[in-house]
Image (tube, rainbow, N blue to C red):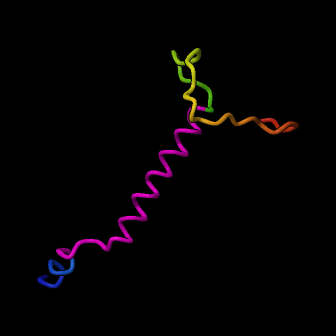
């Protein structure tokens, strides 16, 4: 049990934490772009999208 506490007390390696932080930021960014380009929720139909969100046009000939 003392070994478990000794290992847990050292903390996580910096690279390990960095991967999770960068992944979280990427997931939030990609999710925000997808949400803004999707159908707007009730009450948001006429709202402007932010300037930093790119416009994604569907491919021709494909139905979704």
Membership of 4 in magenta stretch: no
Residue 5 occupies quadrant: bottom left
The stretch of residues the image draws in magenta is 8-36
Task: Give whichever of 63, 16 is nearer the camera.
Answer: 16
Residue 6 occupies quadrant: bottom left
The residue at 53%/18% (across/down) is 44
Provide residue 39's location: percent of width, then percent of height: 62, 27
Residue lying farthest left?
Answer: 2
The residue at 21%/80% (across/down) is 7
Residue lying farthest front?
Answer: 51
Membership of 14 in magenta stretch: yes
Q: In which quarter of the image is the N terminus?
A: bottom left
Q: How many marks?
A: 0
Is residue 34 depicted above or below 20 in this figure?
above
Query: Most prominent secondary structure in the magenta stretch?
Result: helix
Task: Give whichever of 5, 27 is nearer the camera.
Answer: 27
Q: In which quarter of the image is the C terminus?
A: top right
Provide residue 14's location: percent of width, then percent of height: 33, 71
């Amino acid at each position: 049990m003392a070994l478990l506490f000794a290992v847990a007390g050292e903390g996580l390696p910096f690279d390990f934490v960095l991967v999770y932080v960068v992944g979280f930021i990427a997931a939030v960014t990609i999710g925000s772009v997808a949400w803004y380009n999707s159908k707007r929720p009730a009450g948001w139909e006429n709202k402007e999208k932010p300037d930093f969100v790119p416009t994604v046009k569907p491919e021709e000939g494909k139905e979704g």
